Image (cartoon, rainbow, N blue to C red):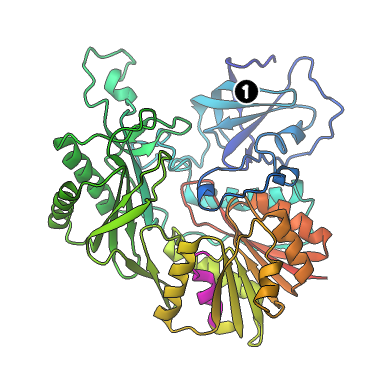
């Protein structure tokens, strides 16, 4: 078989790669690189997702020496059984599909499903009408039990093929209690270009309709994957709650009726940027945060009154004003139009204050399971000194405070440290100390300046990009007896764990926790001990 970019071929899917792509192996004419060593049935494609990196970007110029290549590291290892490998977006093991080749390399290709000829037995009908368009739920057409199985498998394969790690305990994945309506935060975008649905321009037979497309220049919903300037108008979403979708719809109607324009990233004109909705799981608090490019007090007051009248469940309404050109849902300043500007939620026995721009684990129910796993792995002693790196709003530090003597929590973002300090007072905790520290640089000078005692245990929960090499070196110099590494990206976690093992640690066990059902994203907790 010859494989060329742009052509469509029939493929049988017999494996599954990291970040949700089916794997097909085919015979090709005149295959190249036949001397490449072949890995028998295990493959992991490693493309680091860029979602959420913006909260904690690594500024280290030379991190590329240790950073996993987003496109090549795993894909170049994958000539299995001397067969050519094709990664197929939208396919699952057991599928037979027609797929179009989108990228061709010497040892592998990427493709996208055009038609499913024979569906896998674990496929189900997706719940959402926007599935495969908005990109929010990439596995909604797969039975949840199979989703969890694949996530467990992908973590094990990453540790084996990227880290060469086998002699450790891989504990079963902690599945989610809720597989829909589990997020406590959703960030929706306004845009001056609306994504036109296929159903608007074609009938069921694929024939173009002779109709005029209306409302092209206003949208509120989710960005189309890989298309930065177009947004899909969402009328429903199964990630957060039914009331969340209703707030989106009312907001759209209100601003369209007032002829208020969405902000344009090209002309840098317009008013509306983002709509962020935060809901508490245990207290039932509900925050609406409208992000705009300028102030308009009269309009915001009218909008707030409309929202509260329609949705009495809303407890606070905030307007973040972003004066910068960058399209981020964080303002240069904010104004509260209703309520206190804060909401509260609980994890375990502890209560947390959440402001408009606070970081808080997106899945409240699973967060307790995640933190309980960290406690279980750490096997804390009452006289332990703990360093909590990348501590955010202090949720882990506060959660573990009852098990140890003292927690020193290090975090770079000033607003997060402020929230964390407020959460200490809220919970009347006295054995946790928050310290602002840039973990893109060595934090040992801060340890020395503050005369901190040496840690018995370190907990690290870095962003998707993983730990800076300097942070890894600092951990090795501090040499705690125990390290618990919580990660939202097992690929960068493996990279860091390899360095830690080279420095004298041993990987004892891992446990995936599914924080994001219907997606291929997975949290993973790893326990390392000093040898």
Quarter of the image with the N terminus is top right
Q: Depth check: 174 or 185 in front?
A: 185
Q: Which residue is mark 1?
A: 103
Give residue 287's quadrant in the image: bottom left
Q: Is residue 50 above or below residue 215?
A: below
Displayed quadrant of residue 433: bottom right
In the rendered image, the vertical position of residue 423 relative to residue 324, given as above or below? below
Question: Of residues 339 and 164, which is closer to you in this image?
Answer: 339
* Residue 485 visible from this viewpoint: yes
Query: Given the current orientation, which residue lies at the most extreme right position?
Result: 35
The residue drawn where x is 38% and y is 32% is 265
Tell me where residue 478 appears, x and y as whole percent: 75, 71
The quadrant in which residue 232 appears is top left
Q: Residue furthest front?
A: 449
Q: Which residue is located at x 26 percent, y 25 percent?
A: 216
Residue 468 in the image: x percent, y percent?
68, 54
Residue bounds of the magenta highlight: 392-401
């Amino acid at each position: 078989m010859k494989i060329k970019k742009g052509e469509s071929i029939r493929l049988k899917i017999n494996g599954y790669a990291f970040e949700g792509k089916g794997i097909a192996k085919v015979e090709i004419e005149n295959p190249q690189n036949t001397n490449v060593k072949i890995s028998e049935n295990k493959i992991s494609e490693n493309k680091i997702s860029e979602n959420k990196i913006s909260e904690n970007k690594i500024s280290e110029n030379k991190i590329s020496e240790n950073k996993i290549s987003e496109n090549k590291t795993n894909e170049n290892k994958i000539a299995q059984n001397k067969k050519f490998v094709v990664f197929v977006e939208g396919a699952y093991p057991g599928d037979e599909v027609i797929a179009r080749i989108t990228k061709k390399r010497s040892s592998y290709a990427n493709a996208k499903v055009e038609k499913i000829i024979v569906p896998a037995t674990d496929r189900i009908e997706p719940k959402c009408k926007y599935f495969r368009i908005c990109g929010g739920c990439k596995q909604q057409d797969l039975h949840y039990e199979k989703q969890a199985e694949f996530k467990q498998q992908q973590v094990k394969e990453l540790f084996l093929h990227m880290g060469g790690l086998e002699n450790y305990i891989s504990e079963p994945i902690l599945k989610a209690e809720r597989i829909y309506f589990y997020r406590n935060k959703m960030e929706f975008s306004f845009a001056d270009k609306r994504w036109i649905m296929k159903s608007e321009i074609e009938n069921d037979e694929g024939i173009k309709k002779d109709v005029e497309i209306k409302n092209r220049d206003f949208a509120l919903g989710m960005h189309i994957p890989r298309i930065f300037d177009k947004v899909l108008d969402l009328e429903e979403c199964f990630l957060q709650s039914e009331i969340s979708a209703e707030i989106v719809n009312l907001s759209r109607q209100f601003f369209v009726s007032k002829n208020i324009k969405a902000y344009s990233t090209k002309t840098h004109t317009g008013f509306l940027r983002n709509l962020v909705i935060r809901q508490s799981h245990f207290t039932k608090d509900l925050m609406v945060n409208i992000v705009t490019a300028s102030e308009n007090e009269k309009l915001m007051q009218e909008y707030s009154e409309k929202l509260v009248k329609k949705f009495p469940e809303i407890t606070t309404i905030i307007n973040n004003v972003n004066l910068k050109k960058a399209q981020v849902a964080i303002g240069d300043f904010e104004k509260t139009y209703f309520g206190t500007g804060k909401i509260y939620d609980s994890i375990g026995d502890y209560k947390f204050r959440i402001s408009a721009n606070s970081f808080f684990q997106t899945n409240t129910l699973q967060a307790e399971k995640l933190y309980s796993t960290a406690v279980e792995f750490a096997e804390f002693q009452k006289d332990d000194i703990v360093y909590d790196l990348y501590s955010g709003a202090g949720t882990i530090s506060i959660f573990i405070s009852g098990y140890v003597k003292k927690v020193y929590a290090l975090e770079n973002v000033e607003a997060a440290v402020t929230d964390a300090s407020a959460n200490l007072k809220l919970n009347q905790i006295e054995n946790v100390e928050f310290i602002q520290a840039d973990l893109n640089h060595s934090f040992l000078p801060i340890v020395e300046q503050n005369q901190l005692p040496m840690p018995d245990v370190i907990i690290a929960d870095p962003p998707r990009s993983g730990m800076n090499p300097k942070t890894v070196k600092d951990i090795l110099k501090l040499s705690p007896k125990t390290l618990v590494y919580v990660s939202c990206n097992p690929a960068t976690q493996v990279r860091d764990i390899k360095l830690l093992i080279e420095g004298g640690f041993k990987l004892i066990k891992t446990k995936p926790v599914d924080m994001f059902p219907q997606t291929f994203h997975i949290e993973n907790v790893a326990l390392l001990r000093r040898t």
